[in-house]
Image (cartoon, rainbow, N blue to C red):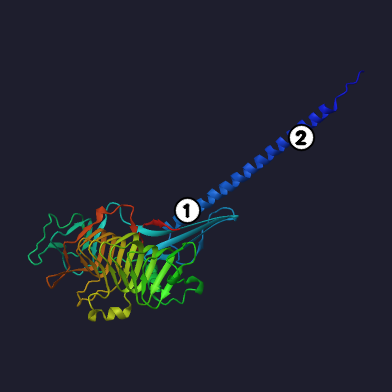
Amino acid sequence: MKSVKLKAGALQMTLFVIVVIALLLGAFVLLTHLNKLVSVKTDFAIETVNNANKGINYSLYNETQYNKPILMDLADESFKSVTVRQDAWGMFQRVSSKSKIKTFEFSKTALIGVVRHKTHKTALYLENTNKPLVVVGTTRIEGDAYVSDKGIRPGNISGQSYYGTALLNGVMKLSSQQLPPLNKNILNTIKAYQDDVDAYSNDQFFSLDTTNSYSNSFFDPVKIAYSTNAIILDYKKISGHVIIKSEISINVSSTSNLKDIILIAPKIIIDDTVKSNFQAIATNSISVGENVQLSYPSALVLNPKSRSNLNEENSSSSTNQIIINEGAVVKGCVVSLGQKISNNYNTHIHIKETSKVYGELYCKGKLELEGTVYGSVYTSIFVAHQNGSVYQNHIYNGKILANDLIDQYAGLSFNNGNKQIMQWLY
């Protein structure tokens, strides 16, 4: 038999083809493995985000102990976990959710508020003092109103009668002798803010004197700027998880830009034309200047100390009061937690003409309403100061328009209210 001789080049070519095929097969196997690995990691990443959302949703429908993280039961593998923590940021509830799957972690945090009833929107809740509510001038109330069994009546102040066509554009209901209670955890948090600063560690403090711009994430521990003297916020840009506290007063200038922070002082003054978004908590007074614009979700909170309450009858009209001057707009809530005193007609909240509140006004005391509230008003009593006289349970030219507030609004945390996300934090 005749043998066939192959050239060396053909053998080399054959070996080359075999190597190429082997490399291609190896690359294909490696690519398949990497694709599967990437797919698993992508699935884990997506599931981590979804589990964090589950934690947020869980907090909307379940009450948990404040400042105590809880581990959700996922009924799944042990390497997956979701930790939910609920606390407060000023007048609003805050929830944080941290999801973990192996090396993947994802966190979300949000402010939570209570939503209003979609069809039966409360315009007014007036404590039942067995007296009628008297409306005068261009007063208008649209929405459901909780009042005493004496109802709503037209009145007259210095020759000005009631000019409306209807006393109420809504359903009249019977109120109780107490306002709907706010969340106790929120109220305890407000009180804790006003106590001393010993609860904070040294590395949580920063100085306003060394910086004009400062930001702190809500995923990090709170930072605090503290002074025993008055604080003037002039040409400052401050945002995030930040508290500014003075033992005397805080003055916010129109040259400053504040976002999501909390101000704490006995006296807080917001100058004319300020445009910001923050919460102000005071023990003595809050003054909002003309044409101020506080965007949602802002809060003005007056929480007098016990000694201030006891001396209230001997105090001036500017003490224990929130005053919102002409042209100012507040989007969020205005709250006075002081006690009403029957022999004193000084107002705890005074909404002046042309000023507007979009949200909720909660006054555990005396309210003088001359401006407009687009939303809901809860108050112990109304007063009207006109021509040197004081008229009890009178509204003079004030307007409460519950139907003009958007349905997506979420605000004050009432007990047993349906919760909704107000704002995602950063």
Tell me residue 82's x, y (percent): 52, 57
Which label sits on residue 149?
none
Label 2 SS: helix
Name the residue rendered at 7%, 65% in the picture.
159
Q: Quadrant of the N terminus?
A: top right
Please identify the quarter of the rendering in which residue 354 is found.
bottom left
Label 1 SS: helix
Q: In this orientation, does residue 253 appear?
A: yes
Q: Nearer the viewer, residue 166 or 131?
A: 166
Disc 2 to disc 1: CB gap under 8 Å: no
Q: Which residue is mark 1?
A: 53
Tell me residue 151's x, y (percent): 16, 62
Q: Amino acid at mark 1?
A: Asn
Please identify the quarter of the rendering in which residue 252 is found.
bottom left
**Mark 2 crowd level (few <14, some 14–19, many ≥20, 10 Å Cα):** few
Name the residue rendered at 25%, 71% in the picture.
348
Q: Amino acid at mark 2?
A: Val
**Mark 1 crowd level (few <14, some 14–19, many ≥20, 10 Å Cα):** many
Q: In this orientation, does residue 178 appear?
A: no
Residue 226 vs 14, above or below: the answer is below
Name the residue rendered at 88%, 23% in the picture.
5
User: In the current view of this chain or complex, which residue is farthest to the left?
Assistant: 159
**In the shown orientation, is residue 278 left or right of residue 133?**
right
**In the shown orientation, is residue 332 left or right of residue 93?**
left
Which label sits on residue 19?
2
Q: Quadrant of the C terminus?
A: bottom left
